Image (tube, rainbow, N blue to C red):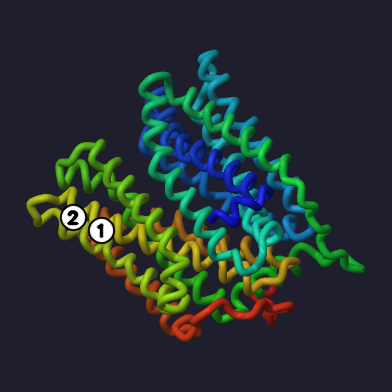
Amino acid sequence: MRGLLRNRDFAKLWAGETISLFGSHVTELALPLTAVLTLDASPGQLGLLGAARFAPFLLVTLFAGVWADRSRRRPILIGANLGRAAALSVIPLLAATDQLRIEHLYSIGLVVGALTVLFDVSYLTVVPSLIRRDELVEANSVMQASASVAEVGGPGLGGMLVSVFSAPVAIAVDAVSYVISTLALLGIRKPEPLPERRSERAKVSSQIRESLGVTFGDPLLRAMAVSAALSNLFQQSIFVLLALYVTRDLNLSPATLGLVLSVGAVGALLGSILANPLGRRMGIGRAYISASALDLALLLLPVASELSYPAVVIAAGFILNGVGLGLTNVFSVTLRQTLTPGRLLGRMNASYRFLTYGAIPVGALIGGALAEAFGVRNAIALCAAGLLIAPVVVFLSPMRSLVTLPDAHDEPPIEEVGSG
């Protein structure tokens, strides 16, 4: 890490993104609290607000990947940050003048979600341009560690700001964090290479098919994408029921739930720190499969209702699950950056996120439907059992024989997916 931080450009990128991640986790808590405390929103309205935030992952991601590969990425990051800062600033302004309505939150959530998709797709493609290839695992470990620290501290900071000031004021803090991140990006001095120019611009539809072909044409990328999508689907099916299960079935307080989620984030931090040494000791493939299997620790959740200390049991499940998430995130990002040539990296990340993040709203619907049919505890048990499928997918792929990072592909095999 000491060597990485001597790279001032990477250090600026890392520091700016860490600050904005803290702000993002503040908004994750403050945005629904604005709807509940300021606008007295109904559960249905909260559901629509959540859908608006995640809809861009299905609607925008593939097009964002094409744009990221046609343009320099750093200006896209700066524009996305400034756009998110401006959109979020509207909420405290409207609240201060008593003009804020739930429709405003829908619209702002949709805009911020779309800009977040554009930022995330471009951000992952910038890192390899600032560091050496042999530093990728270490760099991604550092960045995942920052994300985990923000996940631990951000909700706590958000809760304090909401309690002392108000939910709209907490959102204003997030807007400021995006401005600080922008200043960090403007401070990067290493020139960014121009994207490869083609004699003729390919149609967007053909480039989207190409992006899907990159992800699904490589057996390692395909296995990771499918496994991550299944994991996200079943985990979201559980998370959407978690507050109801903890407060009603287990009679635990919301504060206890917050503490349990923070413990899970500590596990993710630990996993990100362990990724580099475990990858070297076990081999990347075996470490990845083992980490993916830690999702099954969520089977402890439905068992907790039968035990004397349910909060401790749930915390144990979440910390093990967090360790697995931290490890798989580091290995996944590093392998994607290694296997994909620079000109396709933005589109590959877009198609990858389209599949993995697009599963999240589907998982929420499945969790709600199962709870209606079988009850909350039984639904959580069914979805936790479904998590077994994710490690099986990667075990049946070439991942199990992967020891070190594979050689980078100048031009990976491309298979067009779909007809248009």
Marker disc for residue 138 = none
| Image coordinates for residue 22, horizontal then vertical, percent | 49, 39
Q: Which residue is mark 1?
A: 317
> Badge 2 local density, few (<14 within 10 Å), some, or many (20+)?
many
User: Disc 1 versus disc 2: distance between alpha carbons?
Assistant: 6 Å
Identify the residue at the far right of this view.
199
Identify the residue at the far top of this view.
97
Identify the residue at the far left of this view.
308
Give the residue drawn at x 22%, y 48%: 245
- Marks 1/2 in contact by CB < 8 Å: the verdict is yes
Q: Check the picture and name the quadrant holding the C terminus.
A: bottom right
Image-based side of 231 in relation to 257, left or right = right
Image-based side of 220 in relation to 230, left or right = right
| Image coordinates for residue 385, horizontal then vertical, percent | 28, 69
Amino acid type of the residue tagged 2 in the rendering:
Val
In this rendering, the count of numbered labels is 2
Marker disc for residue 313 = 2
Which of the 4 image quadrants contains residue 328?
Answer: bottom left
Can residue 260 be seen? Answer: yes
Relative to 65, residue 166 above or below: above
| Image coordinates for residue 17, horizontal then vertical, percent | 58, 44
Relative to 150, residue 37 above or below: above
Image-based side of 287 in relation to 303, left or right = right
